[in-house]
Image (spheres, rainbow, N blue to C red):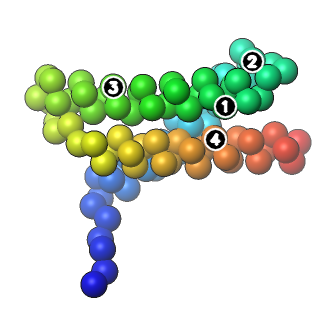
Amino acid sequence: MAYRIAPDKKKHFYVGIPLGFILYWMAALYFVSESYTAAIACFIALVVICYGFEIFSWVTGKGHGDHIDAVAGIAGGIIGMALYRGLIWLW
């Protein structure tokens, strides 16, 4: 039995990739010499933004809040963070 991923989950995942990349870039600018602190700050901001968007959707009724949408966004954000870290390592 194959499991099909819903299109909106894919959208949240793909939006999470540049979000994680940009957040890590901004955190790395702020925490210049502390890469672990930048990664932790970026991850916390990523979780807050993804879950905050879903809670906002649920509370206002504009869209539907779904826990798995937030998880998909966070998963994409982690990929974006890894891409940023890889580019820094190659640089």
- Report the mark closest to the observer, 4 or 1: 1
Reading the image, the residue beneath label 1 is: 39
Quick one: SS at disc 4?
Answer: helix
Looking at the image, do the residues carrying marks 1 and 2 touch, with CB atoms under 8 Å apart?
Answer: no
Marks 4 and 2 sit apart, C-alpha to C-alpha, by 15 Å
Above or below 88: residue 72 = below
Tell me the residue at 21%/30% (across/down): 57
Above or below 19: residue 41 = above
Question: Image quadrant of residue 31?
Answer: top right
The earlier-in-sequence mark between 1 and 3 is: 1
Reading the image, the residue beneath label 2 is: 31
Reading the image, the residue beneath label 4 is: 81
Reading the image, the residue beneath label 3 is: 52
Looking at the image, do the residues carrying marks 1 and 3 touch, with CB atoms under 8 Å apart?
Answer: no
Tell me the residue at 81%/40% (across/down): 88
The earlier-in-sequence mark between 4 and 2 is: 2
The three-letter amino acid code for the residue at tag 3 is: Gly
The three-letter amino acid code for the residue at tag 4 is: Met
Please indicate whether residue 5 sits to the left or right of residue 87 in the image: left
Marks 1 and 2 sit apart, C-alpha to C-alpha, by 9 Å
Looking at the image, do the residues carrying marks 4 and 1 touch, with CB atoms under 8 Å apart?
Answer: yes
* Number of other residues with Cα within 10 Å of mark 2, as a class: few under 14, some 14 to 19, many 20 or more: some
